[in-house]
Amino acid sequence: MLGGGQLGRFFVIAAHEMGYKVVVLDPDRNSPAGKIAEVHLCAAYDDKAALDEMARSCAAVTTEFENVPAATLEYLSKSCQVHPSASAVAIAQNRISEKNFLRDHGFPHAPYAVIRSAEDVPAANSGLYPGILKVSRFGYDGKGQARVASPEEAREAFLTFNGEACVLEMRLKLDYEVSVVLARDAAGNTKAFPTAENAHRNGILDVSIVPARGSAEVRETAQAFARGVAEKLGYVGVLGVEFFVCNDSLYVNEMAPRPHNSGHYTIDACVTGQFEQQVRALCGLPLGDPHQHSAAVMVNLLGDVWPEGGEPAWAILFAQTDLKLHLYGKHEARAGRKMGHFTVIGEDVRDVLAAAMDIRKRIGIEDH
Ligand code: ATP
Ligand code: MG
C-alpha cells in the first residue's frame, strides 16, 4: 500500500481479515496504516531502496494517496501487479489532465480554462466568473482553491499559488452533490455502490446520505457516468467519482483513484465494503456484492471537535446502538484534519439522517 492515511488503514484491516499481509510505504512515522501493517517502510514515495524492498516482498501494489508519483507506480509495475495503473492515476492527480479527459470523452463538467501564467487569466466576459481557481496538483479538502469574482482577483490568487499551473472553473449553482464509488476488475467487470449525497463544510466532506435523496434518475445517471469514466480510463481498482447536481443535471467534479471518504458508509451498510472491494480488485478475486442492506448516514469527525487537551464525549455516540464509530488512530487532532467518522444505519434514510444530525449536534458540530 502506497500511503499510510486512514484509507490505507482501512485497506490493511480488510486485507488482514482476508488473510493477507501488508507492507505500507509512507514517510510519516506515525501514519495510521503504517502502525498496523506487518511492515512500515518509512521513506519517501520515490525512495529507490524502499521501492525495491516493496517490489521484492509484495505480489501486488495499490495506492490510497492520489499524489503518489506516477513514476513510482510505473517502476513497481515492472515487478508486481499494480492497480490502478500509473496512467489512470496520472490523469486523476492533475486537474488539468482530469478536466481535459472529461472534455475529450464528452462527460459533462463545469466550464474551465487552464492557467499556466498570469496572461492566461480569462477576460471578465469569458463566462467563467464568479469562478474558483484551483491548483492543478496536490490540492485536497478545499486546499489550494480560491473563489474569484474577476480577472484581477484571479491573477492575485494565481500569484499566491506561486505560479503553479491552475484551472479556473466557473462556480456552478449547486443544488446538491453526489458521488459514486465503484470497483472494476481486470476483465472489465464493474460493480458500483449506491449513489451517495454529500454535504461539504469549508470545502471538506461533512455528511454523506445514502441512498441520495432527489430523483432516481440523478442516482442512476451518476452510476452510468461513473462506469463510463472507469471504462474510458481502463481503470482497475476502486474509483470515486464526485458530481455536482444543478437543476437535475449532473456535472463530473473530479475522480479519486482510490476508495473515497463518501464510500465509508459501505463498511457498515453494504454486503461488501469499499476496502474489501479494493483488496478483491487488487488480488484478482471476484468482486463482492455491493448491495446496500441498510440506509446510512456518515458523519466526518474533524479535529475541530476535539476539545483542547481532551476528547469528544464518546458516551453520546456509544449510547446510540445503531451507530458505528471508526477512529483513525491519528497522532494529534488538528482543525480540519479527518480524525474519524461515524455511520448511523437503519431502515429509512430520513429517520437515520435525523438521528445522525442530532448526535452530530450533541457532540458539538455546529450546523451549516
Ligand atoms: P476533496 O479532496 O475533499 O474532494 P478538493 O480539494 O479536491 O476536495 P473539490 O472537490 O474540487 O476540492 O472542491 C471541494 C468542494 O468545493 C466541492 O465538493 C464543492 O462543494 C465546492 N466546489 C468546487 N468546485 C466548484 C464549482 N465549480 N462550483 C461550485 N462549487 C464548487
Ligand atoms: Mg472533491
Image (cartoon, helix red, strand yellow):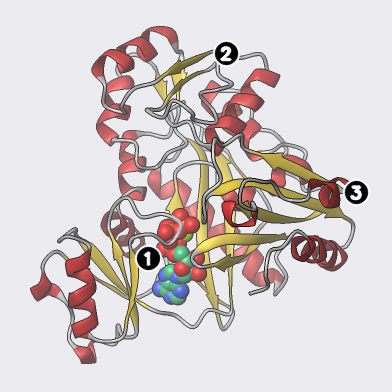
Q: In the rendering, at what x and y percent does residue 360 appear?
A: 75, 61
Q: In the rendering, at what x and y percent does residue 35 appear?
A: 55, 22
Give the farthest residue toward the top: 56
Find residue 319 and name its label.
Answer: 3
Classify mark 1: residues with Cα within 10 Å, few (<14), some (14-19) or many (20+): few
Label 2, label 3: how far apart the Cα atoms are: 35 Å
* Amino acid on which disc 1 is placed: Gly
Q: What residue do we see at 44% from left, 40% from top?
A: 235
Q: What residue do we see at 67% from left, 59% from top?
A: 208
* Amino acid on which disc 3 is placed: Ala
Residue 336 appears left or right of 69: right
Find residue 21 and name its label.
Answer: 2
* Amino acid on which disc 2 is placed: Lys
The secondary structure type at the circle numbered 1 is loop
Instruction: Establish whether ligand 1 lies closer than 8 Å to the Cβ of label 3.
Output: no
Image quarter hosting the C terminus: bottom right
Towards the viewer: 140 or 128: 140
Q: What residue do we see at 24% from left, 72% from top?
A: 157
The secondary structure type at the circle numbered 2 is loop
Classify mark 2: residues with Cα within 10 Å, few (<14), some (14-19) or many (20+): some
Label 3, label 1: how far apart the Cα atoms are: 49 Å
Towards the viewer: 122 or 91: 122
